[in-house]
Amino acid sequence: MPPLSPAIEKFPFYCPIPPTPHPPADTLDRESVRWMVDHGICTPESWLAQINSGHVAATMVPQADTRHPAQNMGLFSDFCYWAYAWDDARDARLDLRPPGALTSHCQRLDRILDHPGPAPHEKDPYCQSLWDLRRRLADLDDIDQALRVTEGMRRFIHGGHHWTRTQRSRTIPTLNDYLLMRSDDCAGSWMVPFYPLIGGYRLTPEEAADPLTLIVTDLVPLIGALDNDVISHHREAAIGEFNVLDVLRNENEGYPLTDAVADAIILRDRLMTLYVRIRDHLARTAGPHLARFAHDIGYIIRGHMEWALETSRYRIPQDAKTGELHDATPFSVEWRDHPGGDNPQPPALPAITWWWDHIESAEAGPPRSEGPISP
């Protein structure tokens, strides 16, 4: 089969986040693949075992020292592999294709998140492996953060369920509705709470509930999701699925793919600019843990792209329904220091417009009662 051309061959990537040292990616990957094989998710020779998800875990959570608990990094890497595997399984497994079967499966996963006690009686490898992840979360010292990961995983599973059913209905949503749906499906809801766990610090309940914390918790993964949409459009097109590029073309009749790519990049650049604005505001005004959290989660964006440039998940994508592999035209990244546009106003999208309102209010308001403290 001839190569599938990606939506873009050179991504003008605005990401003012410098590279830093990170945990040993090959070790993480090897141990997570062994974990998947042990739970029956895949075989050592399978395509899934070759996509280097341990690398995305490492590059998303860089470290300059050895303070990060190693067991938490391994848990994070296993979660990454589980999420990618389950994403494909919803299409690859014939038993999950009927709507009722997928709903029942997601309900069982939901119940496992509720009860980390006895192992589930189901022999389904995704149930058994999710139970193992949930059990290991329950053993962590920081129960509050572990529960945030659990609730984030629940949101991801519900979002994946909704995403799959929407894709199968072939009902292309509006851009506003798509952003809401993509925010639930992109895995950021469980990734973000891992940062304090791995970093060895805690957010207070007040910090965790701060509107700006809640905004960056959704904002950062959404940027990564839009990046993923652009570079993996060829992968979705191969299996008849849509992403943000198709949504933009649907809203603009006759739109060529190149224009949809340009608009998607403008949108992600506006979101990236907003993230930098919130991050820098918290660096000036928040306590050290919240300031660090807002800074570190930006590596979701950079780490995802570094991994995307190497992984066979996008370089040689597999059709989850048929198992067929496709060669994609190579793409690269043009790292940029400035966004592709200077519009400071929020887009007319109710799902996210309010994010700008909160940072404007925070910048105009009185200083926080507790400013930054030296670690």
Image (cartoon, rainbow, N blue to C red):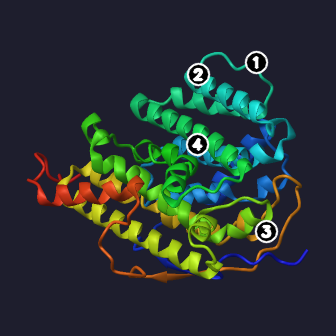
Instruction: Find out whether the residues at labels 4 and 2 contact each other: C-beta distance under 8 Å.
Output: no
Q: Nearer the viewer, residue 247 or 105?
A: 247
Identify the residue at horizontal 56%, vertical 63% (top origin). Answer: 304
Q: Quadrant of residue 334?
A: bottom right
For residue 6, above or below residue 217: below
Q: Which residue is mark 3?
A: 316
In three-dimensional space, the C-alpha distance between marks 1 and 3, rounded to whole angstroms, equals 36 Å
Q: Earlier in the sequence, mark 1 or mark 2?
A: 2
> CA gap, disc 3 to disc 4?
26 Å
Q: Name the residue furthest front.
A: 253
Q: Earlier in the sequence, mark 1 or mark 4?
A: 1
Q: Decide if residue 290 is in sight here.
A: yes
For disc 2, the neighbor class at 10 Å (few under 14, some 14 to 19, many from 20) is some
Name the residue beneath numbered marker 4.
Answer: 159
First-in-chain label (2 vs 3) = 2
Q: Amino acid at mark 2?
A: Pro
Q: Nearer the viewer, mark 4 or mark 2?
A: 4
List x then y, in percent, for residue 97.
Answer: 80, 40
The residue under label 2 is 116
- Determine the residue positioned at 52% across, 27% down: 139
Q: Which residue is mark 1?
A: 121
The residue lying at 48 percent from left, 57 percent from top is 176
Give the number of the mark in front: 2 or 3: 3
User: Furthest residue to the left?
Assistant: 366
Question: Mark 1 or mark 3, which has the lower sequence index?
Answer: 1
Of labels 1 and 4, the one closer to you: 4
Q: Position of residue 256 (x, y in %)?
A: 64, 80
| Amino acid type, label 4 | Gly
For the residues labelled 1 and 4, the Cα–Cα distance comes to: 25 Å
